Amino acid sequence: MAAPWILASLGFTVIVLLGRTRYPRWMAFASPILVPLTKPLTGALPAPIGGYLRPAAGSIIWTLFFLLTTITIWNVSPSSFRASKNK
């Protein structure tokens, strides 16, 4: 059930690490592959906080991922991307 999502997330990570996108390489570590890791982390939080954050953990991670995407790609010009590909 989760296999296509995991494969796509791994593909995203590899492509970003290879420098074939407009993302900086450090964005590979903010990959959506980290979403499953949030459940155990939020489960380890103290009772009131963990109870509120655990159901929303996936949404919070996706929101942070898209926020980072917006911040990192906002001012990247297409010409700078083409120049970096030709190196």
Image (spheres, grey):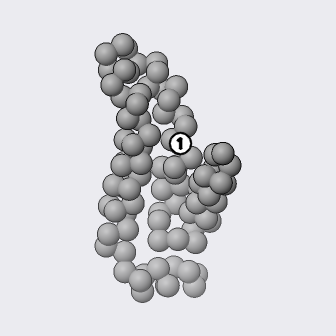
Residue type at numbered disc 1: Leu
Percent coordinates x, y for residue 58 in the rendering: 44, 40
Q: Nearer the viewer, residue 26 or 41?
A: 41
As drawn, the residue found furthest toward the top would be: 47
Q: Is residue 21 above or below residue 64?
A: below
Q: Quadrant of the C terminus?
A: bottom right
Locate residue 52 relative to residue 4 in the image: left or right.
Answer: left
Residue 14 shows in this picture = no
Placement of 82 over or under 35, stated as above or below: below
| Residue at image location 65% in from the left, 54% down from the top | 4
Residue 81 placement (x, y as % from top left)? 47, 79
Q: Residue at x 60, y 52 (%)?
A: 5
Query: In this view of the protein, which residue sits in the foreground, 5 or 41?
Result: 5
Q: Residue at x 40, y 19 (%)?
A: 45
- Provide the residue designation for mark 1: 34
| Residue 37 percent location from the top left of the image | 54, 34
Q: Position of residue 50 (x, y in %)?
A: 38, 21
User: Looking at the image, which is closer to me, 44 or 1?
Assistant: 1
